[in-house]
Image (tube, helix red, strand yellow):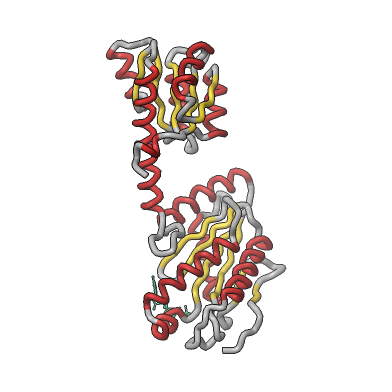
Amino acid sequence: MSWSDMAVNGRILVVDDAMENVQILHRALQDEHEVLFALDGRRALELARTQLPDLILLDAVMPEMDGYAVLKELRAAPETADIAVIFVTALTSPEDETRALEAGAADFISKPVNAAVVRARVRTQLTVKRQRDALRALILTDSLTGAANRRAFDERLHAEWRRCGRAGLPVALMLVDVDHFKLYNDRYGHPAGDATLVKVAGAMRHAAARSQDLVARYGGEEFAILLPQLDGRGAVGVARRLMAELERLAIAHAASPTAARLTASMGIACMVPDEHSRPADLVQVADALLYQAKAGGRNRWCANTAADPCGGSTPDPA
Ligand SMILES: Nc1nc2c(ncn2[C@@H]2O[C@H](COP(=O)(O)OP(=O)(O)OP(=O)(O)O)[C@@H](O)[C@H]2O)c(=O)[nH]1
């Protein structure tokens, strides 16, 4: 599919205080896109936050809250900061145009609008957005396993730490290290090791499948599973599911001193962020617990939960 093919089926928010202008833009765009509309700035901000449009066509002159004020608020909120905005306005002096672009608008369309021009400008902005999204996905993804990479993990950990801290909610983190993976590579070869890491990542996605969960490759054969809004008990539930999934996969590991199949060890830390703690503290606690799980015999988890501090999968002789 080419970029121009991908410049359709966008979600466009049209903001104008005159219904007739909304209708003109709606008619121009409805065949190629999903069109939402708002008749004032407050409603526009609400829709931007809840519906996350790909692009906003924004009237500059509106009573109460004008387009410049709307754009400023969009840019101030992390979830809407990157949404592209095209100003649509009867103000056509170079000063007006410059002011809109300097305020952060991506483009500028003058009223009365021409439907073909609107469609072309919208397609251009959608192409830019799709390219940016693709690039961002590439930058944030581990190419072997398709899991999030370390950079994506760090970004999300900090964002969830702030978000859960504000809401007084816990953040759980599970560090997962495949057991005796050097011996696995030595026995089956590096390409087989790669294929196995892909399967392990799939098992983790299976075990941590809520939309807010993040499976990341933390480095080599070590993975991190970020579980926002989950307490220690819930996180231990994820560990049990992952152990069960690895058991079900039953990937042979004849060289392992721990079991006849591939196993993993896990360190689970759960904290409610407060002003004295940092995301690095959560990582440090999970890392220490992972070390404990390794030292305790592997194929088990250790967690900072009083009720369920350590556990393992069914004994499975090597
Ligand atoms: N196939 C493959 N192997 C990898 C990759 N990344 C890291 N490894 C290997 O993972 C192995 C990790 O070895 P160690 O850190 O000694 O740990 P281990 O053998 O798993 O032993 P324990 O963690 O103590 O159970 C090394 O041999 C790395 O070469 C990868 O992308 N593909």
Residue under the image location 50 percent in, 53 percent down:
157
Whole-percent x, y for residue 302 in the image: 61, 72
Asked whether, in this view, residue 218 is left or right of residue 107, the answer is right
Whole-percent x, y for residue 3 in the image: 34, 40
- Name the one closer to the observer, 241 or 113: 113
Whole-percent x, y for residue 231 in the image: 66, 58
* Residue 302 at least partly seen: no
Asked whether, in this view, residue 48 is left or right of residue 233, the answer is left
Q: Is residue 57 above or below residue 177?
A: above
Whole-percent x, y for residue 88 in the image: 40, 17
Q: Quadrant of the N terminus?
A: top left
User: Based on the displayed image, in which of its 4 quarters is residue 244 positioned?
Assistant: bottom right
Residue under the image location 54 percent in, 58 percent down:
226
Asked whether, in this view, residue 277 is left or right of residue 84, the answer is right
**Number of marks in picture:** 0
Q: Residue furthest left?
A: 94
Residue under the image location 60 percent in, 68 percent down:
242
User: Based on the displayed image, in which of its 4 quarters is residue 314 positioned?
Assistant: bottom right
Q: Quadrant of the C terminus?
A: bottom right
Residue under the image location 44 percent in, 12 percent down:
61
Q: Residue furthest right?
A: 307
Q: Is residue 262 above or below residue 38?
A: below
- Ligand 1's quadrant: bottom left
